[in-house]
Image: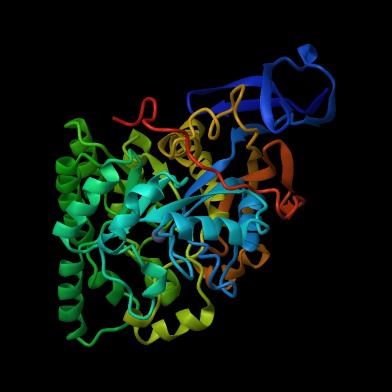
Amino acid sequence: MLDVIIKNATVVNADGRRQLDVAIKDGIIVAIGMASTFAEAHEVIDAGGLHLLPGAIDSHTHVRDPGRSDREDFASATRAAAVSGVTMLCEMPIAAVSTHSAQTLADRIDAVRDRLYTDYALYGGAADDNREHIAALGNAGIIGFKTFRTAVPPGREKEFIGLCCPDPGAFFTVLKETAKTGLPHAIHAEDEYILSRLAEDYKRTGDLGPISHTKARPPVVEEASVAQSIALARAAGAWLHIVHVSSPYSIDLITQARANGVKVTCETCPPYLFLTDADIELHGPYAKTNPPIRDESFVEGMWDRVARGDVDIIGTDHSPFLASEKEPGWSNMFSAPPGAPGIEILVPLLLTAVGYGRITLERMVSVVSTNTANMFGLRGRKGVIAVGADADLILVDLAAEGRIDVNQWQSKSRVTARLWHGRQTRGAVVRTLVRGKTVALNGTVVGELGWGRFVAPNPRPYERPFW
Ligand SMILES: [Zn+2]
């Protein structure tokens, strides 16, 4: 007896689509073909007219749980994921105490165990101040390392233990350690020295209004850090992964390095694809992200690189804050915390990009699901509709027209999500399944707390990585 059969959907993978039926037992896809050849099932879902996709994997979230549950926790974040078609979150190391050792990793997994509607995985920090923990942390179940090439934000020292490494010499030493683990090493690529010099110079103009953020933090801050980090990673033999790339010229540096045999991959995020500096003028501190949202020509350049396949993955950089923390930024942008919520726009906005012909549905599946799973050591288990894979699936209606209403969001940080409010969408998530169980239906969470699990990667080295 099967658990679930999904009939009559168009099944979409990164390499194409076909009209097929899917059979699920014990959370795993056990057959793909004609339902008439399957055994009986407890539940049969008739998905005529809908497309069945692998669930999206958000490669970049900052739930920061345990820590500031007034901003967000894993219960609210995974509810947001479930209703919007995200079946797994890849959580960054920032938390009340950062994930920077095998022990802090184990403590964190323990602390959030009962607050999960969907699956999640964890990154671990790597910097000069936790160097002695890197080897053990790499073998404790993380999907990758994360380093900020910027300094620790003042007052947040405990959240950033083992996370910040602006100094190139120290970072080179850290890369040599992470290289031994075979895991991807993600970086926030902004050059601290260029950044602080330009910010100081800019502050002297007396302009602290919204657009000062992008003026004081031009693309070269990112591009210089990308170029330097690639050189260091090549010499160290590390797998460098550059997150939230905002400049098409950074992507071109990455593409060129990879063509020369350097192990380097990259991610971009919705703010760099769907927003422009005009949104910073309009939404002020609520549109403050690091790196900053760029101008129209950069957004067009980023879409070219996504369509070409030069951008490996798209994640959200979901960063919840309170309105009371963002508001003072109107009079001084430098004082506002950087980041915006984004889990709930990932799938709807990418479906919209597909609906308007920016990219194909197959390209969308590769950048939000298949490539992400493969990069993080989950090839064949997640990110694909195939026999033997987890039944993490979403049913989508490509024709549904609507508007984003952040008041309906599950994320606690919806109060700071005004930059996404009212945007037109084409395509909607109808149903989300995590390991065979329906966790959300037509925008309502129907899953149970505690269903979500911690996901650790396959043993290394990975088969067929990206170079
Ligand atoms: Zn981030």
Residue 5 vs residue 63: left or right? Answer: right
Seen at 28% across and 57% down, the residue is 131
Residue 8 vs residue 186: left or right? Answer: right
Please, is residue 72 above or below residue 223 in the view? below
Residue 185 vs residue 142: left or right? Answer: left
Seen at 49% across and 28% down, the residue is 14
The tally of labels here is 0
Asked whether 85 or 279 is in front, the reply is: 85
Please, is residue 166 above or below residue 434 in the view? below
Residue 52 vs residue 347: left or right? Answer: right
What x and y, as percent, mark residue 245?
A: 31, 52
Quick check: can you spot residue 126? Answer: no
Seen at 50% across and 35% down, the residue is 365
Asked whether 359 or 195 is in front, the reply is: 195
What x and y, as percent, mark residue 155?
A: 37, 81
**Picture quarter containing residue 112?**
bottom right
Quick check: can you spot residue 390? Answer: yes
What x and y, as percent, mark residue 256?
A: 19, 37
- Taking the image in four quarters, ligand 1 sits in the one at bottom left
* Colouring scheme applied when the structure was drawn: rainbow
Please, is residue 167 above or below residue 362 in the view? below
Q: For the C terminus, give its image quadrant.
A: top left
Asked whether 106 or 406 is in front, the reply is: 106
Seen at 85% across and 20% down, the residue is 40
What x and y, as percent, mark residue 287?
A: 42, 69
Q: For the N terminus, give its image quadrant.
A: top right
